[in-house]
Amino acid sequence: MRLARLLTTDGPVSGRYDDGVVYAEDGSYEVGVDGRLLPPCEPTALYCVGRNYAETVEQMEYERPEEPDFFIKPPASLLAHEQPIPYPEFTDELTYAGELAAVIDERCRNVEPEDVSEIVRGYTIMNDVDALDQQGRTARKAFDGSGPLGPWLETDLDPRAVDMYTDVAGERRQEANTELMLFGPYEVVSYLSKRFTFEPGDVVAFGSPANPGLLEAGDTVEITYEGIGTLRNTVVDERD
């Protein structure tokens, strides 16, 4: 089942998504007519894992991590499906990275890998936008618009062998399968839960396959994970 959030003139509504319609408790809403999609959850934080594909580690000449290598994006980084990605004035090297993300369903801590599926609400897609020429991960990754997320949650998905691809301006840039992760989704969520107390709606993103790359103003980024759908956003230059 797909779950979505929609911004209407009367405020946000949530419900089951099916073929362009959100079925909420008080009725049905057509996306694009009655409102626009919002990020599918309201996290207190986005926990993001880097260097989680061997090919990416080799390509970027990183050291292979011995345990999940993570950083955090704030809620201010969120963007919804089809919302423009701002190209900030403080960078000349904006990059994309297409990632699978889990959304936590309940307050929890110290979750064992075999129990992770019980505390995950569903899976969605994140674009880990990065201002590559900035100093330090927080400056690079934790700014407004650096976390496009959506378009909805898929509640019925095994995240361990999902095909994905990323297209930028109509060109295929990434293609992989989540089985190539160094640390699997259940392992990553468990690892982070031993360091942080998760709250409902929190996001855990599992890292990008090879070929993250530069964006130009006007580029449309389409990230697809089979069984979920496609997250689409277009870059808008704020440097003028």
Image: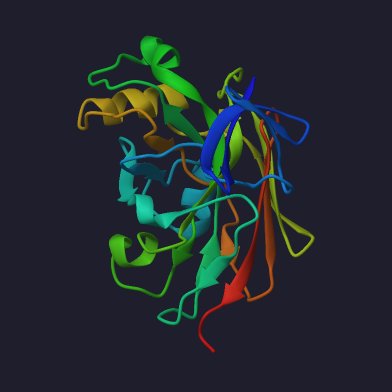
On screen, residue 219 above or below 154: below
Residue displayed at 48% across by 59% down: 60
Report if residue 216 is visible in the image.
yes
Q: Is residue 184 visible?
A: no
Q: Which quadrant of the figure contains the C terminus?
A: bottom right
Specify how the rendered protein is coloured. Answer: rainbow
> From the viewer's perspective, is 138 left or right of 220?
left
Image quadrant of residue 150?
Answer: top right
Q: Is residue 180 left or right of residue 186?
A: right
Name the residue at the bottom extreme: 240
Measuring 26% from the left and 20% from the top, which residue is drawn there?
A: 108
- Residue found at x 79% / y 61%: 170
Q: Residue 110 at x, y = what percent?
A: 23, 19
Q: Quadrant of residue 212?
A: bottom right
In this view, 187 is above or below 236: above
**Residue closer to the observer: 19 or 229:** 19
| Count of numbered circles on the image | 0
Residue 195, image x, y percentages: 20, 31
State the residue in front, 87 or 180.
87
Quadrant in the picture for residue 100: top right
Q: Position of residue 221 (x, y in %)?
A: 67, 58
Q: Tell me what residue is drawn at x 58 percent, y 50 percent.
A: 210
Q: Quadrant of the N terminus?
A: top right
Decide: is 88 above or below 104: below
- Residue 55 in picture, x, y percent from top left: 55, 46
